[in-house]
Image (tube, coloured by chain):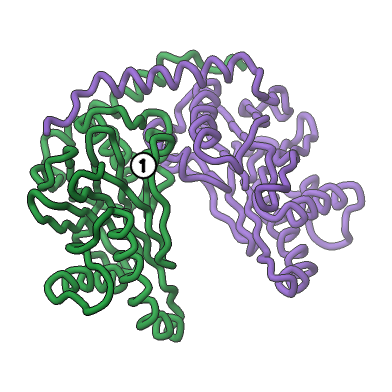
Chain colours: A green, B purple
Amino acid sequence: MTYCVGMLLEKGLVMAADTRTNAGVDNVGKFKKLHTWEFPGERVFVLLTAGNLAVTQAVTSMLSEQIAHPPEMGETLKSAKTMFQAAHVVGSAVRAVKASDEGFLTANGEAFAASFIFGGQIGSEPPRLFNIYAAGNFIEATADTPFFQIGEHKYGKPILDRVARSSMELGEAAKMILVSFDSTLRSNLSVGLPIDLLTYETDKLKIEHTKRIGPDDPYFKMLSTEWSKALRTAFSNIEALDI
Amino acid sequence: MTYCVGMLLEKGLVMAADTRTNAGVDNVGKFKKLHTWEFPGERVFVLLTAGNLAVTQAVTSMLSEQIAHPPEMGETLKSAKTMFQAAHVVGSAVRAVKASDEGFLTANGEAFAASFIFGGQIGSEPPRLFNIYAAGNFIEATADTPFFQIGEHKYGKPILDRVARSSMELGEAAKMILVSFDSTLRSNLSVGLPIDLLTYETDKLKIEHTKRIGPDDPYFKMLSTEWSKALRTAFSNIEALDI
């Protein structure tokens, strides 16, 4: 399984993905699920992927190949004029992989499973964030719901539901997302460290801050310990049910 | 959907179930999913149910009818000599409903979905707790894993994973389970108030404490507010990621 969170803030984007993949519990691997394309001063894109790894890697490879060798028809991530168009480019790549592979997957008893969180900024347009489905269609984040989750999303949703606001600082949002990962990691073995974390500040048009967070990362260790302690204290401070 | 938690403590049992049922989002109902059978001084049983409501109601009705009109062969909840035998009685009822209904459900494109948490005490045997599956087989709680969840279990699992200990007092365990419900209620519309909560003290051999917790319950309102406040404070107290 996988856990990814993307959040659209007034001040930018925070995107995070774990790196564990598994086919059953006895075939566990480590693969990057946070992918970036960057044209400094012009545009940046971040894609988080969940689902069948062969499908999601095919999509990211296709997006890169299109940039290197632009097709005669249609846009690429390099040529798209808006983030809406760029999300269409990703959706079209998903549809192309679906058209080529779904029959073979189905014949093998497997489903065409893939989902994506896609964020970025092009030129003077504000940053935008999309949740792209296996059908290639997508929805866009707004101030009402500024975050998307894909993969094993339920364990880590309560903290986001309580705390997420699009007015947060990038560092606060990153902290919140890491708390959400901490809860997920504790309760589900299919999500594992390291976490890839990217923060993007609006209008920078380049990627300055990415961080791979492993088990020895001092900030994540502190956060995990302090959060556990604080939860226990908070829990003790509430009076027990009088029965 | 549904959310139920059952916990086995050194001092007894705590069992809780929500009351929302839904077939799609436009057909929402309220049904009791916490069922009890009591023979004061002799034995008590609590059954929490999740899954297809027709299936789970058939199982509970069958268990009651067997007590009223004991079959010539086999045990009933009234005659079982141990909780292990009583769990078998429940499992057999599940298998009987499966044998009679599964073909019709499948023909209608529906699955035979049902799961149960079954706890209780018979005579001088200590209280025991079981998770009974749709196949009628079951597992039993131990001190290592003293709780079971069925239904929409992921949102409320992190707090249980962090706090649950079989040495807890009944009132503390009830508080923890209500925090777990609070997180689930906030993040998933298919789980709804009121919550039925039962606490059973070892060796009482009768049911003294049941409580239906609705939106106006003062304890649950306090817990929900205080927990939210405490989480926000705990979150604020952790330093943000320095980016």
Residue density around tag 1, few if under 14, some if 14–19, many if 20 or more, within 10 Å = many
Q: Amino acid at mark 1?
A: Phe
Q: Which residue corresponds to the image point at 27% horizontal and 63% vertical from the top-left? A: A21
Q: Position of residue B123 (x, y in %)?
A: 70, 36
Q: Position of residue A222 (x, y in %)?
A: 17, 30
Q: Which residue position holds label 1?
A: A147
Q: Which residue corresponds to the image point at 35% horizontal and 23% vertical from the top-left? A: A232
Is B28 drawn above or below residue A132 in the view shown? Answer: above
Is B97 drawn above or below residue B234 in the view shown? Answer: below
Q: Quadrant of the C terminus of chain A?
A: top right
Q: Which residue corresponds to the image point at 65% horizontal and 48% vertical from the top-left? A: B25
Is A203 drawn above or below residue A163 in the view shown? Answer: below
**Observer able to see residue B220:** yes
Which chain is home to disc 1?
A
Classify residue B165 by image quadrant.
Answer: top left
What element does badge 1 sit on?
strand
Is B134 drawn above or below residue A139 in the view shown? Answer: below
Q: Toward the viewer: A33 or A125?
A: A125
Classify residue B236 by image quadrant.
Answer: top left
In this rendering, position of residue A59 left or right of residue B79: left
Classify residue A25 by image quadrant.
Answer: bottom left
**Observer able to see residue B210:** no
Q: Toward the viewer: A88 or A13?
A: A88
Number of callouts in the render? 1
Q: Quadrant of the N terminus of chain A?
A: bottom left
Q: Position of residue B196 (x, y in %)?
A: 67, 31
Q: Toward the viewer: B87 or A108?
A: A108
Q: Which residue corresponds to the image point at 78% horizontal and 35% vertical from the top-left? A: B38
In this rendering, position of residue B55 left or right of residue A175: right
In this rendering, position of residue A5 left or right of residue B91: left
Q: Position of residue A61 (x, y in %)?
A: 20, 72
